Amino acid sequence: MKYGSQSMVNKVESILIKHPRDAFISQDHLDQTWQSFKYEGCPDFDIAVKEFSEFEKIIRKWVPDVHYLPLDQLVGIDSIYTHDTVKVTDHGAIYFPMGKTLRKPETRATQLYLEKLGVKTLGHIQGKGKMEGGDIVWLDDQTVAIGLGYRTNEEGIRQFRELTKNFIKEIIVVPLPYADGPDACLHLMSLISMVHQNLAVVYLKYMPIFLKNILENRGILLINVSDEEYDRLGSNILALAPGKCVMLQGNPEIQNKLEKAGLEIHLYPGSDLSIKGTGGPTCLTQPIFRTSGTD
């Protein structure tokens, strides 16, 4: 199959998601595990399934090739967030050991599935290296920004640089703030969502000034999200194609700004699917193949 996703905005042709029935398992399972996974509250299983159905409708409408990561008894409830275990480059998949200890078994499950689909393995972040996919943001197909924080460390970035040295020209390391501490889920993608080649939704309160300057010098217009809507994952937006985006319901301010900028916005409810586990639409998806064009 075709693979490669060195973009945050090119059209998604193939994607990996996971159904809550195969990640959350049941209400009893959620009741027993949500606290150990540091969720903000226990998801309601039935509500999460209904919310996923709405999310899934959007994905299936716009993405031709949708794959489902299967049930695996060795992984936990965070496996619903398929984005973090891997980055699928044009040269193969790079797998991550995950900075959150309870998520480490997910990498094996993802690799087994993607290899069955025919996605070549380029390499792994190993040893003392830590990395999660949410910390990696493509600015173009040869430039990547990587968040340095609790989930991704310097050794992980060093290994990623070595694995991609033949096709990535620049890696921009972005130190992340302490924010709410090591138990909170803070990725670089919490602070920036590319929604078009020259447009990004950002949370400036946590963004280093040097990164703001880099983005603006590249001609990228920054739309800032409020504190309230940041807490509702308003800065976590998935581009299915340039200007065609998926975001969580309940963020009318940033939605209005994007629509005024000419973007097509598709909404899904996510109180139990996304908010309680702090995983928005980008987290729920692993693009396997994005076209190299702009439509």
Image (cartoon, rainbow, N blue to C red):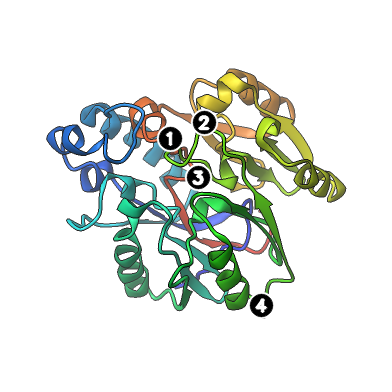
Q: Which mark is residue 278?
A: 1
**In the image, residue 125 above or below residue 133:** below
Three-letter amino acid code at the position of disc 3: Thr
**Residue at the image point whose x is 71% and y is 67% from the top:** 142
Q: CA distance from mark 2 to mark 1?
A: 7 Å
Q: Quadrant of residue 35?
A: top left
Decide which of tag 4 and tag 1 comes sooner along the chain.
4
Q: Which mark is residue 282?
A: 3
Q: CA distance from mark 3 to mark 4?
A: 26 Å
Q: CA distance from mark 2 to mark 3?
A: 10 Å
Residue nearer the viewer, 152 or 91: 152
**In the image, residue 280 above or below residue 292:** above
Q: Mark 3 against mark 4, which lies toward the viewer?
A: 4
Q: Mark 3 against mark 1, which lies toward the viewer?
A: 1
- State whether residue 262 appears in this view: no
SS at mark 3 in the image: loop
CA neighbours of label 3 inside 10 A, class few (<14), some (14 to 19), many (20+): many
Three-letter amino acid code at the position of disc 2: Leu
Q: On the image, numbered disc 2 is attached to which residue?
A: 233
Q: Position of residue 22 (x, y in %)?
A: 22, 48
Q: On the image, numbered disc 4 is attached to which residue?
A: 165
Decide which of tag 2 and tag 1 comes sooner along the chain.
2
Asked if marks 2 and 4 touch (Cβ < 8 Å), the reply is no
Q: Position of residue 255 (x, y in %)?
A: 62, 25
Q: CA distance from mark 4 to mark 1?
A: 32 Å
**Residue at the image point whose x is 29% and y is 64% from the top:** 109
Decide which of tag 2 and tag 3 comes sooner along the chain.
2
Residue found at the far left of this picture: 28
* The N terminus sits in image quarter: bottom left
CA neighbours of label 4 inside 10 A, class few (<14), some (14 to 19), many (20+): few
